[in-house]
DNA sequence: CTACAAATTTAGACTCACCTAAAAAAATGT
DNA sequence: ACATTTTTTTAGGTGAGTCTAAATTTGTAG
């Protein structure tokens, strides 16, 4: 049985590696997990011994299939809980991530399957992120950050960054919800900011925000 | 912020002390928490320093008001979660205790208030145990163990022990649910077993079981 | 009142997950 | 090619919560 810390490491490694594509560096992981590089080295050795990742000194770690399946199970739980909190209990979308960080570690397959069933097998969570199924299969969405769109292009919001409560409140205010259509009116070279239209309303959006809105290609 | 271990100690102390009435001994606590006396002594010192309990060497511990309010908050969460699992997700009453042991430690007042509201402010959990309100007020039920009833007496089941899954399956089978009326037909001095009638069905019940069915006085 | 038994505490050690500081390796710039 | 910077690892240590074994206190029976 994996500890809370081990589960969080695997989840972070999975996310940072782009679903296991690339290797993850020690410092990246330390940053993401709010810990120190030395601590990461320790844990990474342990996870490597247990074969959840492969670790090459000074090079980084890659998640194994075994590790991936743990990560996906945790991500599944996180996203199902977030969906439950919003849909069933009436949480706002900026209130759920923190609680889901705790709930994702509850050990009970029965519980998560019942929640999934209760919710009617949702495909995405309140922020637009896809929910892996019980077998760990996840639908990868074709998406890019809003900041990558060219001036004049039209696109649809797929997902938004879920971990920054203030960002989410702001996005709510301007109606930037998954599913909404959006057009890039103009881009400012200088600071990367851009002007967009969402439901015929115009908004100025900073570069920072435009990095956290994912849109269709 | 209290750790999981600290919360579990306070909950056990509260239960073993009969809601704070009597002192709790080191060995009792060790037994209840599945740990060793030496570990209990350590933890008890810590909780005493933090003033959740008062501790007198070789005599035992008593829970303070501060400790009681923590214990009741955890018990509230435990029982609300159990109720949720049974009523909303369709768990059987013997499947919920273990999961609730985990869920009771989730830190979010918003979450538990939403669950309470969603369930319509239930007064008792699936095993008949009263649910403390948000202020930590709990309705103490007038109750005694079935084994204390005299032959011929009639009574109503108030609650049953919730932590033994096999016991619960058995009680389900004989219809021994909270709210059900029951009559003591006969008692066997020798082994403490007794014959009871539940909805005009007769059952032989061992002493052990009769200790875990709580009935009205 | 004393001897033994039972309960409890102390002493010392372990694992987990973390830390700081120092050493070592890799990357970078001239 | 070499010195400097950056990244990573190693070394040694901490606190939480647990353990075993030994010492101490308390309870009990003759
Ligand atoms: Mn989230
Ligand atoms: Mn987490
Ligand atoms: Mn329970
Ligand atoms: Mn617990």
Image (cartoon, coloured by chain):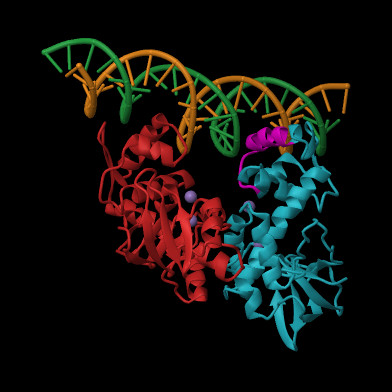
Chain colours: A red, B cyan, C orange, D green
Membership of A4 in magenta stretch: no
Asked if D4 appears above or below A143 in the picture, the reply is above
Asked if D11 appears above or below B148 in the picture, the reply is above
Tally the marks.
0
The residue located at (84%, 47%) in the rendering is B22
Which one is nearer the viewer's eye here, B16 or B145? B16
Q: Quadrant of the C terminus of chain B?
A: bottom right
Which one is nearer the viewer's eye here, B136 or B114? B114
Residue B64 picture location, percent across and down: 82, 42
Residue A108 picture location, percent across and down: 50, 62
Which one is nearer the viewer's eye here, B31 or B44? B44
- Locate residue A26: give its quadrant: top left
Residue A35 picture location, percent across and down: 46, 35
Q: Quadrant of the N terminus of chain B?
A: top right
Decide whether the magenta segment is chiefly helix, strand or loop.
helix
- Locate residue B98: give its quadrant: bottom right
Residue A186 picture location, percent across and down: 37, 56
User: Visible in this render: residue A130?
Assistant: no
In magenta, the rendered stretch is: B33-47
The residue located at (56%, 70%) in the rendering is A87
């Amino acid at each position: 049985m994996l500890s809370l810390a081990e589960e969080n490491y695997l989840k972070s490694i999975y996310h940072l590696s782009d679903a296991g594509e690339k290797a993850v560096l020690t410092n990246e992981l330390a940053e993401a997990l709010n810990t120190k590089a030395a601590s990461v080295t320790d844990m990474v050795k342990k996870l490597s011994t247990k074969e959840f990742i492969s670790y090459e000194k000074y090079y980084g770690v890659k998640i194994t299939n075994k590790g991936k399946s743990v990560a996906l199970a945790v991500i599944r739980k996180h996203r199902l809980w977030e969906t439950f909190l919003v849909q069933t209990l009436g949480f706002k979308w900026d209130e759920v991530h923190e609680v889901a960080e705790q709930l994702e570690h509850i050990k009970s397959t029965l519980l998560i399957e019942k929640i999934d069933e209760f919710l009617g097998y949702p495909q995405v969570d309140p922020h637009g992120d896809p929910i892996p199924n019980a077998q760990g299969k996840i639908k990868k969405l074709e998406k890019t950050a809003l900041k990558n769109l060219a001036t004049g292009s039209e696109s649809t919001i797929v997902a938004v960054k879920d971990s920054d409560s203030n960002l989410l409140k702001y996005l709510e205010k301007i109606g930037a919800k998954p599913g909404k259509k959006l057009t890039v009116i103009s881009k400012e070279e200088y600071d990367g900011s851009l002007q967009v239209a969402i439901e015929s309303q115009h908004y100025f959006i900073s570069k920072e925000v435009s990095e956290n809105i994912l849109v269709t290609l």
